[in-house]
Image (cartoon, coloured by chain):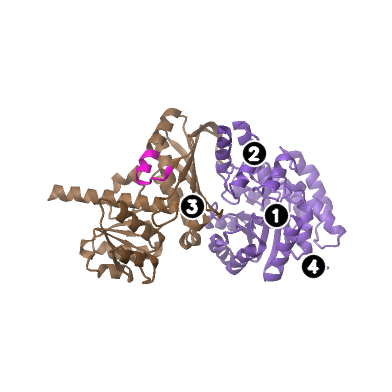
Chain colours: A purple, B brown
Amino acid sequence: MPYTPGKKIIVNDCTLRDGMHALAHQYSVEQMVGIARKLDEARIDLIEVSHGDGLNGNSFNYGFSAHTELEYLHAVKAELKHARLAALLLPGIGTIEDMKMAREAGVDTIRIATHCTEADIAAQHIATAREMGFDTVGFLMMAHMIPTAELLKQAKLMESYGAHCVYITDSAGALLMEETRERVAAFRSELECQVGFHNHNNLGLGVANTVIAIENGADRVDGSLAGMGAGAGNCALEVLIAVTNRMNIRTDIELYPLIDGADQLVRPIQQRPVQTDGNSLMLGYAGVYSSFLLHTERAAQRFNVDPRDILVELGRRKMIGGQEDMIVDVAIDLLKQ
Amino acid sequence: MVAIIGSGNIGTDLMVKILRTSKTLTMGVLVGIDPESDGLRRAAGMGVGTTHEGVEGLVNHPLFPEIEIVFDATSAKAHLHNAEVLAAHGKRVVDLTPAAIGPYVVPVANLQQHLDAPNVNMVTCGGQATIPIVWAVSRVVPVLYGEIVASIASRSAGPGTRANIDEFTETTSRGIEEIGGADRGKAIIILNPAEPPLIMRDTVYTLSERGNRQKIAASIHEVVANVAKYVPGYRLVKEPVFDDVTVRMPGGEPVEGLKTTCFLEVEGAGHYLPKYAGNLDIMTSAALQVGEQIARHMERQAAVTG
């Protein structure tokens, strides 16, 4: 089903959640508030705030954030005049208790993420989120790893638990253009609920694949200012809106505040450029979870091994999102060789 | 003599372990609710008593008076009922469900303290694999924080685990604190669908006071060797990694300490379950160990009072 002229596309910003990965979870509250204000001024629909690995992600495995999630959520919520507040939760890391905390902090949309084959571990969280009155999204990560037909079965499970929207989440930035088209088209024709698309720019297809998703019927799409996200970053939000404006795709979002936010607020605080460089390209090429990037670069330095070898080995071992602990395990094995 | 309630994967694997490896326990009755279940058919084929009428069927079984210890491998909800019935008959219970009516037990760390408890709980598979390491560190230096990541093969995660994954993270976190001895515990679980299935992996991080690294490493090696006595496939796959760190947890002050990282692997014995399912094997192996120790303790007490 191609894009219907006049259909409003819902845009979910990830600068303050996926972008946490790019800063090793070290945003100051002031930085978050400044960025949220700009996004709200641009009339973005949804602003996601959480640890990069979702609520309760603070850990040795994923990194400790500079502030508590409650501090970030309260600070951002107070700034919003237009946008709704979203949060991410990965069953196995966060729990229903964290969802309750988020609800009390004023979160409107909860996104429940599982690996693309494990939708059933989210049944309880999705059903509970609906009971709690959340706008509820299912998020199928590493969607490049299984064929479209299998991915669709998992999406139908999430829909059956009560999700208002199910996402195809290209966590490794590994989907090719035709693979994106096929997945989105299948979801759109087989699901009753909304269809979403989230990706990473590891193969340089961040904006292109998001446009393909919209053209094939996606209702919600993600982006981040200046791409601020794990690996080579997400679909660059300001670029996406420039392109959708040219294509007469309706988002009702203002372009200039996004450009200002990207140039003036986000790029200046990037510690490592968020771009498709050698190591982040390898993520997409090897099909590895994007947030492994900084952890891999640190392990490569500590154990004096080539980060590309670590990433390729992680891909070969079929490691999935959340298995950051295996980065050091692989580095030590490479050192022994 | 013992009985097992639950004729699914866990109950059946435990039965096979008792029959094949235990010198202390005699397998009496396997209890199910489905007469067609593979577990009950196997049990009958191996000469083990069976009933498909749940705990009531067990109470009415001719062998019931001889049963001293009952393992429950059903669900938390079913255990509440089973525990009540068994307590009324004065039977000792080893609970493999998340119900946790009795104290948590990890054999290497705290079983000796609970040999008289009428009902003991086996925590979680991840807890059995990782709490020993936290405990090994905390008996050398105070542990401020213990964190574990358990990665299991998707195929080894049954419907019960999947339907209530929060139970795993919450129960394991509590076990890291209560048995492991950490001031704060955190647990993460990952289900990896790779084919062929991956063997269970566990990573344990502790933040402790800065102590003698050699002593900590020696304590870890000793504990791993002791766990391996009752879980033969339990292995430390790398030497412990030590880092002097300053950690600032959100909302807290910076803390200087020693970060210790341990990488573990748990390969199953392949009794009834496939070898990759180390997560299930460590539960049945640890439960067997608990049952044997309780049985020996009961014998010793009988000898003293008799």
Q: Indicate which disc, 2 or 4, sits on the residue closer to the N terminus.
A: 4
Q: Which amino acid does label 2 sit on?
A: Asp
**Which quadrant is the N terminus of chain A positioned in?**
bottom right
Q: Are marks 3 and 4 in contact (CB under 8 Å)?
A: no
Q: Name the residue under label 3.
A: B169
- Badge 2 sits on which subunit? A
Task: Tell me how far mark 3 sits from mark 1, CA to CA.
Answer: 28 Å
| Residue reaching furthest to the right | A246
Q: Indicate which disc, 1 or 4, sits on the residue closer to the N terminus.
A: 4
Q: Check chain identity for marks 3 and 4: say if they share one.
A: no
Secondary structure found at label 1 = strand
Q: In which quarter of the image is residue A46?
A: bottom right
Q: Check chain identity for marks 3 and 1: say if they share one.
A: no
Q: Indicate which disc, 2 or 1, sits on the residue closer to the N terminus.
A: 1
Q: Do the residues labelled 3 and 2 touch (CB within 8 Å)?
A: no
Task: Tell me how far mark 3 sits from mark 4, CA to CA.
Answer: 43 Å
Q: For the magenta stretch, what is the residue range?
A: B224-234
Q: Name the residue under label 1.
A: A47
Task: Tell me how far mark 2 sits from mark 4, CA to CA.
Answer: 41 Å
Disc number for residue A2: 4
> Looking at the picture, how far across and down is residue A237, in whole percent?
77, 52
Q: Which amino acid does label 3 sit on?
A: Thr
Q: Check chain identity for marks 1 and 4: say if they share one.
A: yes
> Looking at the picture, how far across and down is residue A289, in whole percent?
64, 48
- Badge 4 sits on which subunit? A
Q: In the visual, does B300 lie left or right of A265?
A: left
Task: Tell me how far mark 1 sits from mark 4, CA to CA.
Answer: 26 Å
* Other residues around mark 4 within 10 Å, as few (<14) / some (14–19) / many (≥20): few
Disc number for residue A309: 2
